[in-house]
Image (cartoon, rainbow, N blue to C red):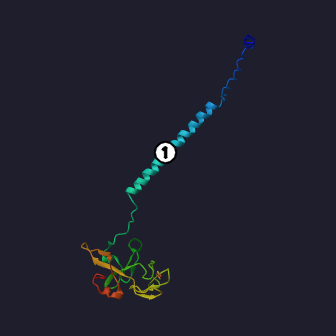
Amino acid sequence: MADEKDAVAQAAPVQAPAAAPAAAAPVKSPDEGTSRRGFMKWTLPVGWTALSAATASSLLATTRFMFPNVLFEPPQAFKIGFPGEFNVGEVDVRFKDAFGVWIVRDPDRFYALISTCTHLGCSPNWLDAENKFKCPCHGSGFYKSGVNFEGPAPRPLERARIVLADDGQILVDKSAKFQQEKGEWENPESFLKI
Ligand code: FES
């Protein structure tokens, strides 16, 4: 019996399992090399540009940090010229935009009116034909002296310190202001007697 089994076993050859089909080799597209090169060709410059932009913006931020915004205001004290350069009876508007003052020359004195409305701070205009200052915001009116006479302005314009400098020029100093309602227009530095 055992011999029979051995005989059967020898008779039936063991079949090797069929070899698995070889993995298909990746098919290389003829364009692949070209498109990879194209990709690199465009990616590198874009990358460098982005890096440069980031570096530049970081440098700009650092520079702004080192040099912060500074508000440059006109000087508080400034010379406006010699007394003989002003006409008697006139309001000189040349210094309004740069320094915020009008220079008024009366027959016997000068004074510097600050061009800020005493209502809400707008900048009035000198109206030569009407011989008055008129505020465009709410209509306040001021005489040539600076005294208010119409509109909502509650008090006269303020005057700035005005003196003669060593070189003979008129010096206006806005850091010292004089208010009529406080009796400060009597202060000898609130006008310049000639
Ligand atoms: S701000 Fe000049 S009248 Fe109001």
| Residue at (46% x, 51% y) in the render | 57
Q: Secondary structure at mark 1?
A: helix
- Seen in the picture, residue 69 relative to 62 is either above or below; the reply is below
Residue 67, image x and y in percent?
38, 57
Q: Residue 126: in sight, yes or no?
A: no
Residue 84 screen position, x and y as percent? 31, 77
Q: Quadrant of residue 42?
A: top right
86 up-or-down from 40: above or below = below
Give neighbour class at mark 1: few <14, some 14-19, many 20+ (Cα, 10 Å). few
Q: Residue at x 35, y 86 (%)?
A: 180
Q: Is residue 6 left or right of residue 81?
A: right
In what quadrant of the picture does the N terminus appear? top right
Residue 153 sits in quarter: bottom left
Residue placed under numbered mark 1 in the picture: 51
Give the x, y percent position of residue 178: 33, 82
User: For this rendering, which residue is in front, 19 or 132?
Assistant: 19
Q: Is residue 151 above or below residue 18?
A: below
Q: Is residue 42 left or right of residue 64?
A: right
Pick the residue in front: 175 or 101.
175
All told, the count of numbered labels is 1
* Amino acid on which disc 1 is placed: Leu
Residue toward you, 154 or 20: 20
The quarter of the picture where residue 16 lies is: top right
Q: Is mark 1 within 8 Å of ligand 1?
A: no
